[in-house]
Image: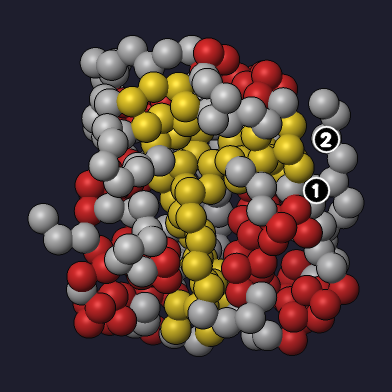
Amino acid sequence: MSSETDHPQRSRRLLTRRATDRVQDPDARARPPRPVPASHWMLPDPRAADEDGVVGVGADLSPATLVDAYRRGIFPWPHPGVPLPWFSPDPRGVVLAGRLHVSRSLRRRLRSCGWTTTVDHAFAAVVDACGAERGAQGTWITAGMRAAYLRLHDLGWAHSLEVWEGDALVAGIYGVQVGATFTGESMFHRRTDASKVALVDLDARLLAAGGRLLDVQLTTDHLRSMGAEDVPRARFLRLLAAGRDLDVRLSLGERAVSRLAEVGSEPSIAP
């Protein structure tokens, strides 16, 4: 089976949208996730992960397995040549909803860029662009991973946020939402600062919906510059468990990013 990066022509077509796609109820929300059966696999307790954060290897990528894993703070991360590893790193990279740091230069970008955002308008295109940006040799978004997250999206568990410049998709994030926690899986950008804009918009929509936590899994310099922090895994698991059964549904409608120019504050997360 070929991977998503083997179809550049198809990917380019997916990076634009029809004008009619913009028409939508501004108050529309994501549908509730559909129930999945109990997982056939018993993933180990995430607190028993090894020093690299590996909880276990194997299992499958069925919706039941993935939902069970994310509800327990575990995520898959394929590595070439080994059975599928499942991770729960310690520490964990997180941002409390509404506490993302927005720099002065990013505020200027928000005011002047003219971009808009949507949720769940182009999930497959965002996944494909995330894989293509890293190249066929560098992406962990294999054909199997792509298919698995598309299934989760169809069931209402996985979502994408898109950043648009007119009809062109210039950035996006996709991930899995479990109640009040959104776990970001990957992002891409085609314009300067566009991935930062995507994070700010996702944070704002999550907060407005009653969400509590933006899980970035592992911090990077880029994410730390925006306020992501490393917290002990035990702290993350408590935050996850406290909100995983809440009814939190993101707004779907097209929004101007200029509205975000005044949001954001310095983060502070207790250990």
Quadrant of res 106: bottom right
**Label drawn at residue 16:** none
**Mark 2 or mark 1, which has the lower sequence index?**
1
Q: Residue 15, percent across and down?
A: 36, 78
Name above or below for residue 152 compared with residue 52.
below
* Residue on which disc 1 sits: 99
Q: Residue 150, percent across and down?
A: 29, 50
* Residue on which disc 2 sits: 269
User: Quarter holding the N terminus?
Assistant: bottom left
Name above or below for residue 66 compared with residue 229.
above
Quadrant of res 241: top right
Seen in the image, is 34 located left or right of residue 111?
Answer: left
Quadrant of res 55: top left
Identified at 39% across, 22% down, the residue is 56
Q: Residue 23, percent across and down?
A: 43, 73
As helix, strand or loop, the secondary structure at mark 1 comes to: loop
Q: Tell me, yes or no, if residue 11 can be seen here.
A: yes
Q: Amino acid at mark 1?
A: Arg
Marks 2/1 in contact by CB < 8 Å: the verdict is yes
Q: Nearer the viewer, residue 229 or 205?
A: 229
